[in-house]
Image (tube, rainbow, N blue to C red):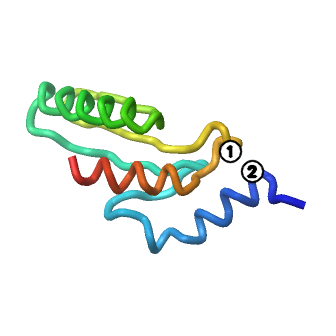
Amino acid sequence: MSPGPADRGFFYLNRMQELPKNWSEHDNALVREFQFDAYVDGVEFVQRVAELAELVQHHPHITIDYTNVRISLQTHDAGNVVTEKDLEMAAAINKL
């Protein structure tokens, strides 16, 4: 019997020590907030994240609030839990 979505999420969330720096788990998602000096800097960052997301076909939830950008990652196809795809995407976003 294969694990259900909650089991898969639990498996990946037990690997939090492997998470890229500054990411945390919240409501079955990886979350990070980024702070920028100016609104346009945050928008430019979001554009780079969007280009990466299109390249790898893994699209985060993104919220822009003036100079703050919040990114949330979870894999919808796996039942809205954190998977290896999310861990890889978080690491790639950290490199932008």
Image position of 63 with respect to 2: above or below: above
Nearer the N terminus, badge 2 or badge 1? 2
Residue 79 picture quarter: top right
Task: Give x and y (percent) for residue 37.
Answer: 9, 38
* Dot 1: element: helix
66 horizontally vs 40: left or right: right
Q: Residues within 10 Å of mark 2 (few under 14, many from 20)?
A: some
Residue designated by label 1:
78
Secondary structure beneath disc 2?
A: helix
Q: Amino acid at mark 2?
A: Pro
Question: Is 76 left, or right, of 24 in this rendering?
Answer: right
Residue drawn 49% across the image and 50% down it: 86
Quarter holding residue 70: top left
Residue 68 in the image: state x and y as whole percent.
25, 36
The amino acid type found where label 1 is placed reads Ala
Q: CA distance from mark 2 to mark 1?
A: 6 Å
Query: Residue farthest to the bottom?
Result: 17
